[in-house]
Image: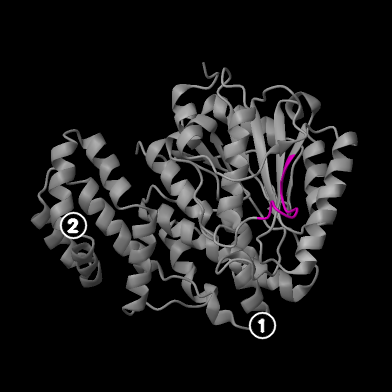
């Protein structure tokens, strides 16, 4: 008989990553949590991350398995392959002296490299998280934590995560983050602009009343292991895996915003993924500021009008809500036709007779991806993006706040106000 809960065993049988990989180095015991770290040619960065985890007190450190997935695709360059093998050797040696319960998956040695079609951060996170499920103590509501090999944590990191889930009813959480200081002024300006862009989008969602107002940063996610299984696990996407993973968790178990500790990703230029921080950093450092232009507040005002239109009129029929949407924005109305609003809303009303259930179903349908798509369509149709000094004052005014004058000051203001006054949840 399996010692896993039935739902976990079904997941392990049907959804777990298949391949030649195994977990090495794990102690012969179960853990109340696991921190999963993908590592691709990280060298010293990986060990700096491990050392920051070691600074956590022993009572918390001992209950978490730290699982490093040393990996690269079959078509990785020779330099990355050699670095990974060096990292793997160093990691094995390091584990003998480390105060961490440390384990690793070798997805870098010949015969164990990840097939080109699968290679990417989504698959690697999934590989690590899937294997971590087998190392957990399922009598204690175990946790899974996503971290990156270039991301430092604070000494209260593990304790804060445990305490949060003891107090929160939700299944997942995003952690506060701020990028490390860059080594030069050009790189610092680039990461400040990109982080401000990320935060301003989430700020706009929050002002608009979207239940998807949380940052999607792969190294700043934690969830209950049961919630991981319930949402179908991590996806295999080569980029944006964090966004889609959190969206699934929001629909099944809710996503909270944790406070009390922070993670510190390294600001780096990278071409490993088709979009995201590393790619945008490279373009900004080449002087291409138009690659990161900020959304106008008008787009979020339209989003707000649409969300209120529905959530305050749950008994209204599809035609009435659509006619009101037409008055809010013609682009919104066209988009609703495109995503089959008139067929969808009657089904939601029929299948969810209570207002609470209907609201949950609506937000599950009009999800984070559809929200982002609407914002992009509105911008493409004439609501122009622009520079932060031009775009962001209206956001702060909407929120009843004064707007700082510079990018660093605006960024710090959004970092400071990124504290939850309400829970972001599928139950709202």
Residue 22, how many percent across, how many down? 68, 39
Q: Is residue 95 left or right of residue 409?
A: right
Q: How many marks?
A: 2
Nearest the eye: 370 or 95: 95
Magenta portion: prevailing SS class: loop
Mark 2 or mark 1: name the one nearer the start of the chain: 1
The vertical placement of 393 against 202, above or below, is: below
Q: Residue placed at 81% from the left, 49% from the top?
A: 88
Q: Is residue 405 left or right of residue 86?
A: left
Mark 2 is surrounded, within 10 Å at the Cα level, by few (under 14), some (14 to 19) or many (20 or more) other residues, namely some
Mark 1 is surrounded, within 10 Å at the Cα level, by few (under 14), some (14 to 19) or many (20 or more) other residues, namely few
Quarter of the image where one finds residue 136? top right
Instruction: Name the residue carrying label 1.
Output: 286
The quarter of the image holding the C terminus is top left
Q: Residue placed at 20% from the left, 71% from the top?
A: 330
* Region rendered in magenta: 104-113
The vertical placement of 382 against 400, above or below, is: below
Instruction: Name the residue carrying label 2.
Output: 341
* Label 2 with label 1: CB-CB less than 8 Å: no
Query: Can see residue 300?
Result: yes
Residue 384, how many percent across, how many down? 40, 79
Q: Secondary structure at mark 2?
A: helix
Residue 349, how many percent across, how many down? 15, 42
Q: Secondary structure at mark 1?
A: loop
The question of residue 272 being in magenta is answered with no
Nearest the eye: 345 or 320: 345
Nearest the eye: 158 or 392: 158
The vertical placement of 104 against 280, above or below, is: above
Q: Is residue 258 left or right of residue 110?
A: left
Residue 364, how many percent across, how many down? 32, 46
The question of residue 107 being in magenta is answered with yes
Per the rendering, the mark at residue 97 is none
């Amino acid at each position: 008989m399996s010692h896993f809960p039935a739902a976990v065993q079904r997941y392990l049988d049907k959804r777990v990553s298949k391949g030649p990989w195994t977990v090495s180095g794990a102690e012969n015991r179960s853990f109340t949590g696991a921190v999963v770290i993908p590592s691709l040619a990280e060298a010293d960065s990986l060990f700096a991350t491990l050392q920051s985890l070691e600074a956590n007190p022993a009572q918390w450190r001992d209950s978490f398995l730290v699982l490093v997935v040393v990996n690269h695709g079959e078509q990785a360059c020779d330099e990355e392959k050699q670095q990974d093998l060096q990292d793997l050797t160093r990691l094995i040696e390091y584990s003998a002296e480390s105060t961490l319960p440390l384990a690793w998956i070798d997805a870098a040695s010949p015969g164990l490299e990840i097939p080109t079609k699968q290679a990417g951060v989504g698959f690697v996170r999934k590989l690590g998280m899937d294997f971590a499920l087998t190392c957990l103590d399922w009598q204690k509501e175990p946790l899974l934590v996503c971290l990156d090999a270039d991301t430092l944590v604070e000494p209260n990191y593990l304790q804060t995560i445990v305490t949060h889930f003891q107090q929160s009813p939700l299944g997942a959480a995003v952690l506060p983050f701020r990028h490390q200081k860059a080594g030069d002024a050009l790189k610092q300006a680039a990461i400040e602009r990109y982080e401000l862009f990320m935060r301003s989008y989430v700020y706009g969602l929050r002002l608009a009343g979207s239940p998807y107002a949380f940052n999607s940063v792969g190294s700043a996610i934690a969830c209950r292991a049961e919630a991981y299984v319930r949402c179908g696990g991590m996806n295999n996407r080569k980029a944006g895996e964090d966004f889609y993973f959190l969206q699934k968790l929001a629909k099944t178990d809710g996503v909270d915003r944790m406070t009390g500790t922070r993670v510190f990703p390294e600001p780096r230029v990278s071409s490993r993924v088709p979009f995201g921080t590393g790619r945008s950093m490279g373009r900004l450092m080449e002087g291409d500021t138009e690659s990161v232009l900020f959304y106008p507040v008008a787009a979020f005002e339209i989003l707000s009008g649409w969300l209120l239109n529905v959530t305050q009129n749950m008994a209204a029929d599809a035609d009435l809500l659509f006619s009101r949407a037409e008055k809010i924005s013609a682009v919104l109305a066209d988009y609703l036709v495109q995503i089959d609003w008139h067929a969808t809303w009657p089904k939601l009303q029929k299948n969810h007779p209570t207002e609470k259930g209907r609201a949950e179903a609506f937000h599950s349908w009009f999800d984070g991806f559809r929200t982002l798509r609407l914002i992009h369509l509105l911008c493409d149709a004439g609501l122009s993006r622009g520079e932060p000094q031009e775009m962001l004052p209206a956001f702060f005014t909407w929120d009843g706040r004064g707007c700082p004058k510079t990018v660093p000051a605006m960024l710090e203001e959004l970092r400071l106000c990124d504290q939850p006054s309400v829970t972001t949840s599928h139950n709202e």
